[in-house]
Image (cartoon, rainbow, N blue to C red):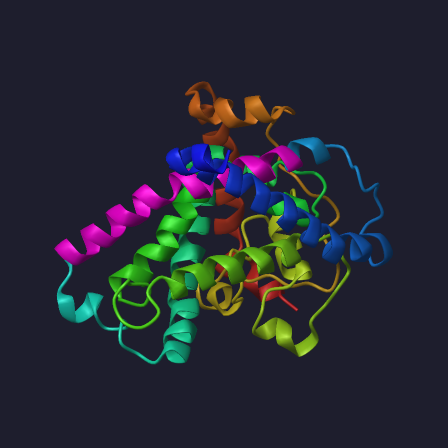
């Protein structure tokens, strides 16, 4: 069996990814499930409506990252080195590792912020990102409820800046460690901010995103299209999309109709017939945002 898998590297990657996903899911459940029971932002069953779909997305996107993310990442590396001066692409490659990690967190966050924001503001991208926002229950597993196109696009936006500045380059010390660390830290934190837990970080919320911060990003009607940052809320303050009232959101989800099954959620966004619907929804949202200066920032608490 081992020899067979060794002779078929793609199959080996498939089996290894599934195995890693299972034990990671066990660890995440052990960490977050008790908090979602005893410190829940809103009471619900563990196997809530849509749980099976979220679980399916969890495994599907684990495979998508393993099989689909590498080609665009390689293309980005080649393109940045071909189009940008070496003084820029090699800037961060030889910084001390600790400094490169800090710089990468900040620079990558800028790319992730704008990739995420564009996914809301551009109708074509929104029809993929809407899958994530269609969840009417927000819990840690909703983190991976995302269309692969949306998942890959946001990561490409973030990592493009890392490779363009040499912060994520294979050159220098510990090649590949920065990118792997950003992926791991960002993923774990994203599970945390999606978790159904009534937790505030106090003064640290000025520095780090929290469940409260990100749950307001998932609000259905009240101040949509805010709080795009994945880890550093300062991005939303700088770009005028920060919102932090005193209370938690009343309702999650989207106004547009979304299919309930995973196959439909996977293939429907690829069909042009959903584009008009998405465009109408985003047009209303943009009118709401333009009517409130700085995306509602003056109401932030």
Give how far across and how far down residue 120 sits, in percent: 47, 44
- What residue appears at the point 65 percent right and 58 percent down from the top-left corner? 192
Kindly report the secondary structure that dominates the magenta region of the rendered protein.
helix
User: Which quadrant of the figure contains the C terminus?
Assistant: bottom right
Q: Quadrant of residue 112?
A: bottom left
On screen, 141 above or below 254?
Answer: below
Q: What residue is drawn where x is 31% and y is 44%? A: 72
Residue 81 percent across, percent down from the top left: 17, 57
The answer to which image quadrant residue 123 occupies is: top left
Instruction: Establish if 106 lies above or below 186.
Output: below
Horizontal placement of 6 versus 219: left or right? Answer: left
Residue 262 percent across, percent down from the top left: 60, 26
Q: How many marks?
A: 0
Q: Nearer the viewer, residue 123 or 201?
A: 201
Does residue 180 appear in the picture of this structure? yes
The reply, left or right, for residue 226 in relation to residue 301 is: left
The region drawn magenta spans 55-83
Tell me, yes or no, whether the highlighted magenta stretch contains residue 93.
no
Q: Which of 166 and 274 lies nearest the eye of the viewer?
A: 166
| Residue 118 appears in the figure | no
Q: Up-down: is 30 above or below 236?
A: above
- Magenta includes 63? yes
Q: Nearer the viewer, residue 42 or 240?
A: 42
Looking at the picture, how far across and down is residue 259, in whole percent?
61, 24
Q: Residue at x 33, y 62 (%)?
A: 162
């Amino acid at each position: 069996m081992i020899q067979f898998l060794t002779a078929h590297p793609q199959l080996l990657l498939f089996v290894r990814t599934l195995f890693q996903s299972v034990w990671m899911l066990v660890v995440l459940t052990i960490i977050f499930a008790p908090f979602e029971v005893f410190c829940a932002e809103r009471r619900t069953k563990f196997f809530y409506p849509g749980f099976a779909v979220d679980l399916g997305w969890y495994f599907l996107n684990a495979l998508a990252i393993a099989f689909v993310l590498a080609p665009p990442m390689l293309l980005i590396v080649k393109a940045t080195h071909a189009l940008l001066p070496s003084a820029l692409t090699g800037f961060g490659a030889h910084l001390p590792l600790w400094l490169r990690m800090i710089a990468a967190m900040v620079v990558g966050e800028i790319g992730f912020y704008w990739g995420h924001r564009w996914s809301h503001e551009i109708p074509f991208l929104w029809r993929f990102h809407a899958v994530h926002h269609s969840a009417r229950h927000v819990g840690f597993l909703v983190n991976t409820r995302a269309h692969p196109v949306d998942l890959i696009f946001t990561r490409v936006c973030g990592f493009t800046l890392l490779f363009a500045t040499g912060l994520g380059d294979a050159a220098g010390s510990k090649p590949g460690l920065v990118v792997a660390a950003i992926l791991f830290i960002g993923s774990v934190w994203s599970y945390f901010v999606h978790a159904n837990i009534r937790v505030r970080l106090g003064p640290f919320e000025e520095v780090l995103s929290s469940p409260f911060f990100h749950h307001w990003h998932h609000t259905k009607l009240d101040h949509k299209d805010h709080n795009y940052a994945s880890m550093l809320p300062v991005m939303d303050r700088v770009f005028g999309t920060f919102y932090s009232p005193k209370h938690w959101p009343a309702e999650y989800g989207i106004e547009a109709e979304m299919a309930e099954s995973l196959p439909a959620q996977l293939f429907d966004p690829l069909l042009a017939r959903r584009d008009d619907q998405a465009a109408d929804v985003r047009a209303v949202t943009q009118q709401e945002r333009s009517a409130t200066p700085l995306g509602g920032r003056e109401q932030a608490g």
